[in-house]
Image (cartoon, helix red, strand yellow):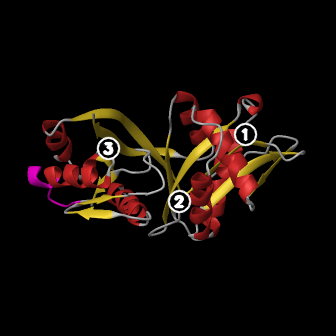
């Protein structure tokens, strides 16, 4: 299962606007942003990696004008962390990823006066991005590049869900990357402060996951940012599965 999830990450980064392949690595470069959470690398699962490969990876990041950073499932490259630390990388975080299959998905009710829908206009996309940025502490104003990136994700087969109030205000939302190999990552689940503690995060997560399964996805996976979100995801049917590493060069 780890290898299958890791391969889906490789495929996702390879679909970035300007991906860079460096030996056993893929860097998902997006020219419209320097965000390290979008421009990062991952190794191909089960591939032998040397110190020379890491040196070449750092050089490729520098050439692209991006900070060297990786996200990957630890079991798929067991010796990589030591090579990266020796090259000057620092561990940012270690997370357990969770996965859901059709048989475990639970769908909670949507809170009253809220509707879960797919954003179909750029103004709706901007409202969703702003709600996510507000929840995660980012810039509350969605840029044109942010909106275009979300539009591309939808056009490529990704799933996006926003929670709208009766007057059209975006209360939160989230999405999932275009599936590869019947696997998709769910991410960006966010709820604005006035709408929290009503079960909305679980309803959004379940709605995204259900839409993935109706398209033939067999495995949906995500990561929890903390104990509260972990409980939310477990209630809708996600279960712990493996370990991921976030590591970057200062």
Q: Secondary structure at mark 3?
A: loop
User: Counting other residues with Cα less than 10 Å from the Cα at mark 3, is it few (<14), some (14-19), or many (20 or more)?
Assistant: some
- Looking at marks 3 and 2 on the same chain, the residue that comes earlier in the sequence is marked by 3
Give the main secondary structure of the magenta stretch.
Answer: loop
Image location (x, y in percent) of residue 44: 27, 61
Residue occupying the point 63% across, 55% down:
147
Residue occupying the point 36% across, 63% down:
19
Question: Would you name the residue on which mark 3 appears?
Answer: 67
In this picture, residue 99 sits left or right of residue 90:
right
Image location (x, y in percent) of residue 56: 16, 55
How far is disc 1 from disc 3 in space, using C-alphas?
35 Å
In this picture, residue 138 sits left or right of residue 169:
left
- Looking at marks 1 and 2 on the same chain, the residue that comes earlier in the sequence is marked by 2
Residue nearest the observer in this picture, 55 or 83: 55
Q: Is residue 51 magenta?
A: yes
> Can I make out residue 193 in this image?
yes
Q: Secondary structure at mark 1?
A: helix
Q: Are marks 1 and 2 in contact (CB under 8 Å)?
A: no
What residue span does the magenta drawing correspond to?
46-53
In this picture, residue 216 sits left or right of residue 183:
right
Residue occupying the point 60% across, 58% down:
150
Question: Would you name the residue on which mark 1 appears?
Answer: 200
User: Counting other residues with Cα less than 10 Å from the Cα at mark 2, is it few (<14), some (14-19), or many (20 or more)?
Assistant: many
Which quadrant does the C terminus fall into?
top left
Question: Would you name the residue on which mark 2 appears?
Answer: 177
């Amino acid at each position: 299962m780890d290898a299958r999830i890791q391969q889906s990450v490789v495929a996702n980064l390879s679909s970035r606007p300007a991906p860079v392949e460096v030996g056993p690595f893929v860097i998902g470069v997006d020219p419209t942003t320097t965000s390290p959470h979008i421009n990062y690398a991952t190794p191909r699962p089960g591939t032998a990696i040397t110190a020379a490969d890491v040196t070449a990876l750092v050089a490729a990041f520098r050439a692209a004008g991006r900070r060297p950073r990786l996200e990957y499932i630890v079991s798929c490259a067991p010796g990589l962390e030591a090579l990266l630390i020796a090259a000057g990388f620092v561990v940012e975080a270690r997370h357990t990823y969770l996965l859901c299959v059709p048989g475990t998905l639970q769908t909670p009710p949507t809170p009253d006066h809220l509707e879960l829908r797919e954003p179909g206009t750029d103004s709706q996309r901007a409202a969703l991005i702003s709600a996510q940025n507000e929840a995660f502490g980012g810039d509350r104003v969605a840029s044109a590049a942010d909106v275009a990136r979300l539009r591309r994700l939808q056009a490529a087969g990704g799933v996006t869900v926003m929670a709208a109030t009766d007057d059209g205000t975006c209360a939160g939302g989230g999405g999932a990357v275009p599936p590869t190999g019947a696997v998709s990552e769910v991410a960006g689940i966010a709820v604005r402060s006035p709408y929290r503690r009503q079960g909305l995060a679980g309803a959004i997560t379940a709605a995204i996951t259900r839409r993935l399964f109706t398209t033939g996805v067999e495995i949906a996976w995500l990561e929890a940012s903390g104990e509260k979100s972990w409980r939310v995801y477990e209630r809708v049917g996600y279960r712990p599965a493996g370990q991921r590493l976030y590591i970057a060069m200062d």
